[in-house]
Structure formats: C-alpha cells, structure tokens
Image (cartoon, grey):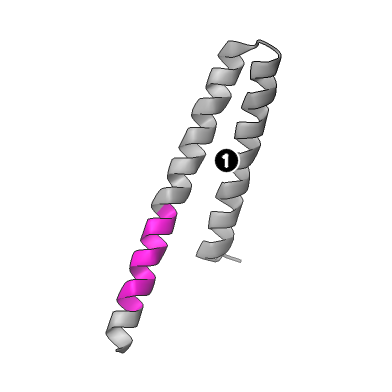
Amino acid sequence: MPQSPHNRLAELHNLAAHAHAAAAVAHGKADHLTAHELSKQAHEHSMNVHKLAEELATKQKDARASTA
C-alpha cells in the first residue's frame, strides 16, 4: 500500500531527527568522524523533507486553483 505524502514527510522528519540525535551523541563521545557523517546524513534527510514538502504544497496549490 503506497504511503500518503504526509506520512512520507513524517517519516523523513523522524529520520532527520534521529540522525541529528545520533550525531549529537557521537559529538559528545568525541567521535568526530562519525558525528560528521551522521550530521551529513541528517542534513540530507532534512533536505529531502524540504523538497517533498515543497512538491506537496505545489500540488495542493494547483489542485485548489483548478477547482476554483
């Protein structure tokens, strides 16, 4: 069963939050290479969320315009 765009956004937000938390733990342990990798991963997840949210907003705006 395909995910709704809103569920996918929530999943990506959770992935980004988890990666940020893991990076913070790694920074606290002075594991800077791993922390850097986790921070990069968190940033990538955040960028994916942003892109998907923009696409969803555009689709909703177009749908409203076509029904008006």
Q: Is residue 16 above or below residue 39?
A: below
The image quarter in which residue 19 lies? top right
Which secondary structure class fits the magenta region best?
helix
Q: Quadrant of residue 61?
A: bottom left
- Residue at the location (54% across, 21% down)? 37
- Left or right, residue 13 beside residue 30: left
Q: Where residue 67 appears, x then y in whole percent?
A: 32, 88
Residues in magenta? 52-63
* Vertical position of residue 65 compared to residue 33: above or below: below
Q: What is the x, y in percent for residue 4?
A: 54, 66
Q: Whole-percent x and y of residue 68?
A: 29, 89
Res 33 quadrant in image: top right
Q: Is residue 61 magenta?
A: yes
Q: In this image, 27 relative to 45: left or right?
A: right
Per the image, the residue denoted by label 1 is 16
Task: Classify 10 Å Cα crowding around label 1: few (below 14), some (14-19), many (20 and above).
Answer: many
Q: Is residue 48 above or below residue 28?
A: below
Looking at the image, residue 24 lies above or below residue 49: above
Instruction: In the displayed orientation, state which residue is furthest to the front.
Output: 28
Query: How many numbered marks does the figure carry?
Result: 1
> Where residue 60 sits: x, y (%)?
38, 72
Name of the residue lying farthest toward the bottom: 68
Pick the quarter of the image with the N terminus: bottom right
Three-letter amino acid code at disc 1?
A: Ala
Residue lying at 59% horizontally and 61% vertically, measured from the top left: 7
Residue occupying the point 56% across, 48% down: 12
- Whether residue 57 appears in magenta in the rendering, the answer is yes
Q: Nearer the viewer, residue 5 or 32?
A: 32
Front position in the image: 2 or 41: 41
Residue 46 located left or right of residue 18 = left
